[in-house]
Amino acid sequence: MNAATRTFSTEGDYKVADISLADWGRKELDIAEHEMPGLMSIRRKHAASTPLKGVRVTGSLHMTIQTAVLIETLKDIGADVRWASCNIFSTQDHAAAAIAATGTPVFAWKGETLEEYWDCTLDALSFPDGNGGFLGPQLVVDDGGDVTLLIHKGFELEQGDESWVNSASGSHEEQVIKNLLKRVHAERPGYWTRVVADWKGVSEETTTGVHRLYQLAEKGQLLVPAINVNDSVTKSKFDNLYGCRESLADGLKRAMDVMLAGKVAVVCGYGDVGKGSAHSLRAYGARVIVTEIDPICALQAAMEGYEVKTVEDTLGVADIYVTTTGNKDIITLAHMQGMKDQAIVCNIGHFDNEIQVDALKGLAGVKQVNIKPQVDRFDLPNGRSIFLLAEGRLVNLGCATGHPSFVMSNSFSNQTLAQIDLWANKDAYAPQVYILPKKLDEEVARLHLEKIGVKLTRLTSEQADYLGVPVDGPFKPEHYRY
Amino acid sequence: MNAATRTFSTEGDYKVADISLADWGRKELDIAEHEMPGLMSIRRKHAASTPLKGVRVTGSLHMTIQTAVLIETLKDIGADVRWASCNIFSTQDHAAAAIAATGTPVFAWKGETLEEYWDCTLDALSFPDGNGGFLGPQLVVDDGGDVTLLIHKGFELEQGDESWVNSASGSHEEQVIKNLLKRVHAERPGYWTRVVADWKGVSEETTTGVHRLYQLAEKGQLLVPAINVNDSVTKSKFDNLYGCRESLADGLKRAMDVMLAGKVAVVCGYGDVGKGSAHSLRAYGARVIVTEIDPICALQAAMEGYEVKTVEDTLGVADIYVTTTGNKDIITLAHMQGMKDQAIVCNIGHFDNEIQVDALKGLAGVKQVNIKPQVDRFDLPNGRSIFLLAEGRLVNLGCATGHPSFVMSNSFSNQTLAQIDLWANKDAYAPQVYILPKKLDEEVARLHLEKIGVKLTRLTSEQADYLGVPVDGPFKPEHYRY
Amino acid sequence: MNAATRTFSTEGDYKVADISLADWGRKELDIAEHEMPGLMSIRRKHAASTPLKGVRVTGSLHMTIQTAVLIETLKDIGADVRWASCNIFSTQDHAAAAIAATGTPVFAWKGETLEEYWDCTLDALSFPDGNGGFLGPQLVVDDGGDVTLLIHKGFELEQGDESWVNSASGSHEEQVIKNLLKRVHAERPGYWTRVVADWKGVSEETTTGVHRLYQLAEKGQLLVPAINVNDSVTKSKFDNLYGCRESLADGLKRAMDVMLAGKVAVVCGYGDVGKGSAHSLRAYGARVIVTEIDPICALQAAMEGYEVKTVEDTLGVADIYVTTTGNKDIITLAHMQGMKDQAIVCNIGHFDNEIQVDALKGLAGVKQVNIKPQVDRFDLPNGRSIFLLAEGRLVNLGCATGHPSFVMSNSFSNQTLAQIDLWANKDAYAPQVYILPKKLDEEVARLHLEKIGVKLTRLTSEQADYLGVPVDGPFKPEHYRY
Amino acid sequence: MNAATRTFSTEGDYKVADISLADWGRKELDIAEHEMPGLMSIRRKHAASTPLKGVRVTGSLHMTIQTAVLIETLKDIGADVRWASCNIFSTQDHAAAAIAATGTPVFAWKGETLEEYWDCTLDALSFPDGNGGFLGPQLVVDDGGDVTLLIHKGFELEQGDESWVNSASGSHEEQVIKNLLKRVHAERPGYWTRVVADWKGVSEETTTGVHRLYQLAEKGQLLVPAINVNDSVTKSKFDNLYGCRESLADGLKRAMDVMLAGKVAVVCGYGDVGKGSAHSLRAYGARVIVTEIDPICALQAAMEGYEVKTVEDTLGVADIYVTTTGNKDIITLAHMQGMKDQAIVCNIGHFDNEIQVDALKGLAGVKQVNIKPQVDRFDLPNGRSIFLLAEGRLVNLGCATGHPSFVMSNSFSNQTLAQIDLWANKDAYAPQVYILPKKLDEEVARLHLEKIGVKLTRLTSEQADYLGVPVDGPFKPEHYRY
């Protein structure tokens, strides 16, 4: 979709691709609500007390059907919500339309340019103050940390440190952010300082975003309390693992209709995302090769019967490459030039820099042939071709619809509980990274059992005494790994 | 898609949804050719000798990208081809457009009415004789036996037996066929008799179509030699099993985006299609219950750890129902009324009568809500809702894109070899059902090994003598089950 | 166990290792009877009519607990039974003792020499005639065809053709057989001719034995009607597949206590035995490489994600080698010399000549170190060592206890039905190879469903008409592959 | 084996079943050393510096072949070792003999009485002081905490608190311990106080033992620093998970030779041990039902497609019960009375009190029939029978040989590193529970990669900077769950 030719529906305080998709979006929201029992249960429980009453919440998280249920949950418990997506390809336009149609400001469409993406992020951060100016959020729901980054960098600039915005940029996107910050600096003097004054906390969804938060906290630069939602067991061991187990193949199939059986697939990284990805590909009959830097995860892969090699060792042999690492330069240009003809390359980790997409596009003599949205064939100078999915961004969101509702209900239950917790403790929490207590983690799981017919056993008090745990939990020590 | 509003591209001798999709279709055909090594190898081998030179071939087989490669293979080895789909939802419109754009008459679009479907079948049977009249095909590629049925029933009518066309119809579709036959009878007197005179054989793709051929042959009513392609090992044990293992979940995901992990899924039937379906669902973390009538298949299911029950026993418990039987009335109206709220019902077996769709639609008080093409919610009078996919027709073709290319390359290699064999033996074969010799079956497999890096071991002559088989095969007795 | 030091219990008409083990054997027989519902059901059904009343039956089949239940079933339906094992390592001594203790002549112990083995086979063939001479069996239960071979070769000799017994032998075992035949020729003139006169049929258990029967029949040399039990679906697709899936790892574990996870295992052959073996090893986390000669089976292996290579390609990489072929020279001496240190080599196919055991033992400079019964380390001149299990004979029977009872109940139900059928049709059948009718095959499956809680669906008469099959089966055409 | 009739080899300072088994044990030790690369690498690394030179180490840990390699490693790095098993059935007698034969005091045989067991534990604790008296250990290797319990309770008694030793006992074993303590109190006045004075630390192997240590530490009663070896990733996520995945079925097979395919198996608990157990049973084709108290683990089980129910719901349906919890009264007498005929009950969790064995044995009218060592049939008054394996103790150790060497190499590498660490920091550590640093955990994994052919990828410095981790690790935050 080309920005120049897109006709936006922007009559209200939103930017979506096509507001007429709202009805369809609503029908799918209805389906999703049945699949998100935890989130709906939390909504019902807090609908009367509205613990986020009047709280300004900015969300930056893939604008999918599931996120729409999260947004409506936050609204039902009182919040004043503005939303952007956290990925240029991850918006489901009918979901965005359904949310916009209810009057909630949402700024997201599938296929944004990077400039549009960051403008949308700013829109989601800008609550009209009624006087033509803008207030910032009191709470942030972040996925990958883009909102957190923007506020921190904007604040840094207003504090007088212009070194970063004036430095050379390592990527086009970095420059887009800097340009935006400079523009805001000019147009809204003191804006980020006012935002920070009101900001009470952020809950972060991803491994990568959390990693950045810990780094900020270690340096003493974190401006607000943060809740690490990713490391709730019911998030990282569910969404990352079981979500990717379902959505990776979904993305591959919708993009390429490729037979997985008999193929050699390389999964780069064997964390939770990699585990789910490898499991799924093997179940289809692919032969999976894993690459790892961490000897423990490598040994886990070997114990499951996966061959563990380097990417270099697989060139000319493998048909499919999937990056799952959160790291950069996993698939380099040199790798892509060494791959067999018709190899498929995609990313389900975090940023598009897991694959050297810019280098690929810039290769002299390369020819990019678009097959359909989010599917490109690159004809290389060496005479071979490779397929790149979703331009190296998340293949499950770019080429399919992301994780299914049921697993996202777990993640978003944690998000909602985190938002409630941050607000309730806004005066108590320090600017550190917190994890939700295990009792809440167990509660999130509990809310999802009935829907799928699970019947729990209950400890007798004698057994609880024997174990030294309460009858109703929490049942495990903090270091327990599940 | 509504027939009234569709604008056909019908300037040439074809009917497709949108001829402008041809370029996209061609790009995907290019991809598919790389994934169909067996078919492409046969094409290359026979391109010079053109064993089907000038032979009129009618195909009735899902008009997908893969079928397009089959069509072009038949053309490259000399055939004069006309094509229709064998299912109202299974056409990929860009595939049909790509074929039409090359001048091959194709009559197929996704979302035909039953009347349109059978008209398309007739179009595919009607080779212009240059004088404003029509010749019939000399060979038929059939999938489900609709062309074979039409010719046999038309011939029966022209032989003076009007009993069937005037009998009461058990379904709407049956009546559509009868109406067509009566119309042709009026418009083209003696047409079917002339068709039969030229007709030299049919190769049939499916379990169900083959079953009908054997029944015709047993009654002495089969008009031409037939080759049972389905029971080539490289067809039924590949396409049915490995194809469905990939395409069932694909259909479910594109239709419903549903989380499969944790769900209870009922797979009705544990033949090859059921085996592939059950395997796939379990691999995603669904709990699979199998229903079976055959104690051997039931015992196989149990040996794989599936619970084997009746559909009745699963009502109120299961979330997903998949029929895979080739039989009718597997999911009855009463079943659907007993299902839990939000249950999903679909068919990957053969005809839509595996599910009592007509009865569901006719239920007093039912409300059908279309979510998106091929996905309907039925709100039942009992207050619960169920989802029906592809109106009960093949979910992998209706809601996704059917089997992937690589496995179809096996099936279509058999089809092509069968067509060549039928023509070569047109004077030798009797009107019976034949199976391709095992040597050819092994050859089809062999043509697919290199692509996926398989390295065969070769018998020494001492080993071959010890086993009593030729060094180059065939290696197994006819009764071997693989 | 050394023959020289073994104290046999031979007071009665039997030779077993230790008759005092009979009580233990009986307890395990009791357990097995609960796990063999099909066989017990047939026993109960025919106990009154005793269809084999007074019929002399010789069995040559692994003398395990499960076989003991088969023996007692044959006796309960009237037969006069004598038994030997068909493998020098496969006898469970407590099973043999339990049978001997009931007065049934059995000649089998774990760890026979080849001379002892063939003497036992002769003992099982020699029914005392009451006058100091011997009658032969009227029916034979064969596994691998050793009894059939002996009778045919003995008869050939008595017909005056001495070419084979005087020819050079390719193995030690071949010479043992020839010596035996010459001795019998001298001691019992005309014995084999009298045996053949009474012999009415043989039912054969294995792929290999069946293969030999077909070869004899093709040459017109088969002396009696034979029933191919192996190719009952409920035999080859159950015992070979599901049996090996359980017993291969069992043999490996009892022999070597080796961790399978993380190991590279080579499975030579991907027939039913290979399929079960590969599945089991992968499930434990081994990385499985398959070798195959047949392109169809090779493609099946690839579709399941197994790497398919030659044995040569795996040398230095693989930790475990399993032969499953029924062919010879699969693992050669050269292979074993190229293996990595501590590699494990075993056979679950048929004969020990799948591995070149004789060549290994004869290698100059090799040192054989016995670790425990059926486990030997060979220190090779190249400084590496390999482990050979069960001296290359069936590892599941040599190192563990063979297939579990439930799956053998299927196989032995077929055996029993075959014996009944052979006797009932002794005047009708020609000296050909027969397969049990599908109806009986389905019946065998049916008898095993209740035990494991399977509930079959029953066709309505409308459905049966639609399919063109009887409501009660048989449900599938003969060529159906399951 | 009955204590009264056993002839011990007790000429030296050891008690083993049969010293003549030492040669066999040594051969298996040689095999195990090849399968334990981590442990052997640590042995080689520290053999020269002997960091435990002269340190008295008492081990209480299953006296298997693998443990023998651990013992010899501790000796090679300088320790003075005495050893007992931590389970009455878990000793491999040839392993104990091999160790005894080298002059290391070992007190263990398969099939001890509880009295013998605790006497052996005391023997392992009693280092001769050269004057007819005894010194205690300086370090303890514990598995389940029996040595730690004995020292703490003995010390408590000597401190004047006689309340526990004089209290009523909940089990026979508890009384045995009290009797022992009273006897030592009488025979060796002040012994435990002297032991405690020298004692510098304990490393603990199991979930259960660790749980007790944390409880002691919380109450301020822990006497020495402890290292929680169980929660090294390379222990709990390897040994518990992958070990049980291999050894549960091994135990079931050696005990019962039962077909697992088609059976219904109930796995009580879905921690690491339960996960491995459930995976293994399903892979064999059993239908697995899980019971859980923890909603998170229950949801994990459901996401893998297991049915989650209570034990009560499975009675009359399930064939096999496996407890994996570390809790007590998981399988009650009432449960056992409700089971279907021939059900098999076993424990792979921790103590035998997971199953109410005492209550079963005490049931009026019950009849216990021993089938073979560690396999008993209980004929219940209701007419049904059940099988109890290893008298409710660990089935993998009681009925098979425990976990395989390779996975134990991980666990025991951690044990060895923990012992070295405890001694090196004996003056620095407080009486708390420590975990080995992640760097060492990764190192243990790294030592096992080469053996199984794993090739690690190495971070570039740019990538390491991007991630904010050192190029050589550690790679993950402490809370990472793997």
Image (spheres, coloured by chain):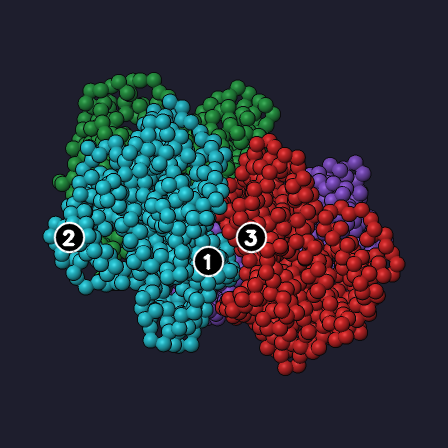
Chain colours: A cyan, B red, C purple, D green
Q: Which labelled disc corresponds to residue B399?
A: 3
Subunit that carries the residue with mark 2:
A
User: Mark 3 and mark 2 in contact (Cβ < 8 Å)?
Assistant: no
- Across and down, in percent, residue C269 comes to 56, 62
Residue D98 visible in this rendered orientation of the protein: no
Subunit that carries the residue with mark 1:
A
Helix, strand or loop under label 1: helix
What residue is drawn where x is 50% and y is 61%? A258
Q: Label 2 neighbourhood size at 10 Å, few (<14), some (14-19), many (20+)?
A: many
Q: Which labelled disc corresponds to residue A252?
A: 1
Place residue B82 in its image quadrant.
Answer: bottom right
Q: For this rendering, which residue is in front, B326 or A178?
A: A178
Q: For this rendering, which residue is in front, C95 or C130?
A: C95
The alpha-carbon separation of the residues under discs 3 and 1 comes to 16 Å
Residue A363 visible in this rendered orientation of the protein: yes
Q: Label 3 neighbourhood size at 10 Å, few (<14), some (14-19), many (20+)?
A: many
Q: Amino acid at mark 2?
A: Leu
User: In the orientation shown, which residue stands out farthest toward the right?
Assistant: B160
Q: Amino acid at mark 1?
A: Leu
Q: Which residue is mark 2?
A: A157
Q: Is residue C206 left or right of residue D467?
A: right
Q: Are marks 2 and 1 on the same chain?
A: yes
Helix, strand or loop under label 2: helix
Counting residues from the N terminus, which is met first, the one under dot 2 or under dot 1?
A: 2
Q: Are marks 3 and 1 on the same chain?
A: no
Q: Is residue D76 left or right of residue C465?
A: left
